[in-house]
Image (cartoon, rainbow, N blue to C red):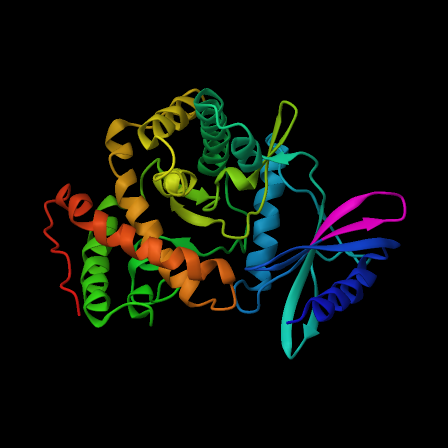
């Protein structure tokens, strides 16, 4: 979809909110098409044209119901705006695609990721991860204690949703970017991981609704306030997956052990988590690499994927044997084709 086409679609959709538009600026065009909208009074919003087929309307409404509950619990999360007729979403057709469209109030501040990049001091970075751990624990506390409303629906990052025959982010082991040997290896590996996840179970204090994309780019810092944004991937899953996602991109360039310690330190100020539970974080780091292969392979239009996919493949190949040895499972590195 061209920039002009998507912008025209955004402007058409905004008519359902009766906003006097001053400007419509593109932000991202990866998973969803996202714009910053400013009205004539200077009020800013985020408009999302949701990726077709990724979520049902019921799932999108459920996302807003969770963020509303988090807001009631005192967390700073995006505030949705209903349409003129009181609906949570509208919909439009663009290039023969049916897209749901939602509007959120703009969140002022700077992404934590930008602050980290501009202040490479080790102490600042570890303190940032400690703060991230604390707000992650607040989300988990709310999710564990919350009674789900009727008709609530979100996807699951459970054994099937991550490593089953039809995982939520796609059959990564069939990626055309893999060699035949790698495809067979990842298929065998994901079956082993599926069995491990089944053994972890869901009847545990570390399984609930999770953000599932809670890395520093999705924390907006405004003075002393931390805003959690982008709940598009949120669903049911293990808390260790949230931890793994937060740390995944920092394993090469940063002191991973220090960042994990900092995150856990902040987390435990708010919510307990046992060392036994934390022992599974390397497994979820491996899982994040594998499912990311599926995510990128299903989105060839995303340019950054071409850079990151080989990294995810290399990471999974290099870590799999060591991670699975913890569970007394032997997986040999695949031979070169």
Q: Nearer the viewer, residue 133 or 223?
A: 223
Image mark count: 0
The magenta-colored residue range is 36-47
Query: Is residue 274 toward the left or the right of residue 17 in the image?
Result: left
On screen, residue 279 versus residue 140, left or right, reads left
Magenta segment, prevailing SS (helix, strand or loop):
strand
Extreme-bottom residue of the structure: 96
Residue 169 appearing in the image: no
Q: In the visual, does 256 lie left or right of 266? A: left
Q: Kindly tell me whether residue 34 is visible in this rendering.
A: yes
In this rendered view, identify the residue nearer to me: 20 or 112: 112
Quarter of the picture containing the C terminus is bottom left
- Percent across and percent down for residue 111 are 59, 37
Say which quarter of the image contains residue 177.
bottom left
Where is residue 322 shown, x and y percent of the image? 16, 44
Identify the residue at image location x=18%, y=56%: 192
| Residue at position x 72%, y 71% in the image | 5
Q: Position of residue 297 (x, y in %)?
A: 40, 66
- Give the quadrant of residue 105: top right
**Residue 171 vertical placement versus 155 (above, below):** below
56 over 67 or under it: above or below: below
- Answer with left or right where residue 245 lies relative to residue 185: right
What residue is rendered at 34% in x and 32% in y?
Answer: 256
> Which of 238/315 is in front?
315
The N terminus lies in quadrant: bottom right
Against 49, residue 125 (above or below) is above
Instruction: Name the image quarter holding residue 60.
Output: bottom right
Q: Is residue 250 magenta?
A: no
Q: What percent of the width, then of the height, locates residue 238?
A: 36, 43
């Amino acid at each position: 979809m061209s920039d002009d086409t998507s912008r025209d679609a955004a402007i058409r959709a905004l008519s359902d909110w009766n906003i006097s538009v001053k400007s419509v600026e593109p932000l991202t065009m990866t998973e969803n098409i996202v714009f910053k909208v400013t009205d004539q009074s200077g009020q800013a919003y985020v408009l999302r044209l949701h990726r077709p087929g990724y979520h049902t309307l019921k799932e999108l409404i459920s996302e807003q119901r969770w963020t509303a509950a988090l807001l009631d619990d005192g967390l700073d999360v995006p505030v949705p705006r209903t349409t003129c007729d009181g609906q949570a979403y509208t919909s439009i057709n663009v290039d023969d695609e049916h897209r749901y469209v939602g509007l959120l109030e703009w969140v002022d501040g700077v992404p934590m990721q930008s602050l980290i990049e501009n202040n490479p001091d080790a102490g600042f970075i570890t303190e940032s991860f400690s703060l991230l751990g604390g707000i992650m624990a607040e989300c988990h506390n709310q999710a564990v204690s919350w009674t789900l409303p009727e008709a609530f629906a979100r996807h699951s990052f459970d054994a099937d949703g991550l490593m089953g025959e039809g995982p939520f982010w796609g059959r990564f082991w069939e990626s055309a970017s893999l060699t035949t040997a790698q495809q067979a290896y990842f298929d065998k590996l994901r079956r082993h991981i599926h069995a491990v996840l089944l053994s972890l179970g869901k009847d545990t204090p570390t399984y609930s609704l999770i953000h599932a994309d809670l890395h520093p780019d999705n924390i907006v810092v405004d003075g002393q306030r931390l805003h959690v944004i982008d709940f598009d991937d949120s669903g049911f899953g293990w808390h260790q997956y949230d931890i793994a996602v937060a740390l995944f991109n920092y394993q090469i360039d940063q002191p991973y052990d220090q960042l994990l310690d900092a995150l856990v330190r902040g987390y435990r100020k708010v919510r307990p988590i046992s060392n036994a539970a934390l022992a599974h974080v390397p497994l979820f780091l491996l899982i994040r690499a594998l499912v990311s292969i599926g995510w990128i392979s299903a989105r060839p239009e995303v340019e950054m994927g071409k850079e990151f996919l080989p990294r995810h493949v290399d990471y999974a190949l290099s870590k799999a044997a060591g991670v699975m040895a913890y569970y007394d499972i032997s997986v040999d590195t695949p031979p070169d084709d």
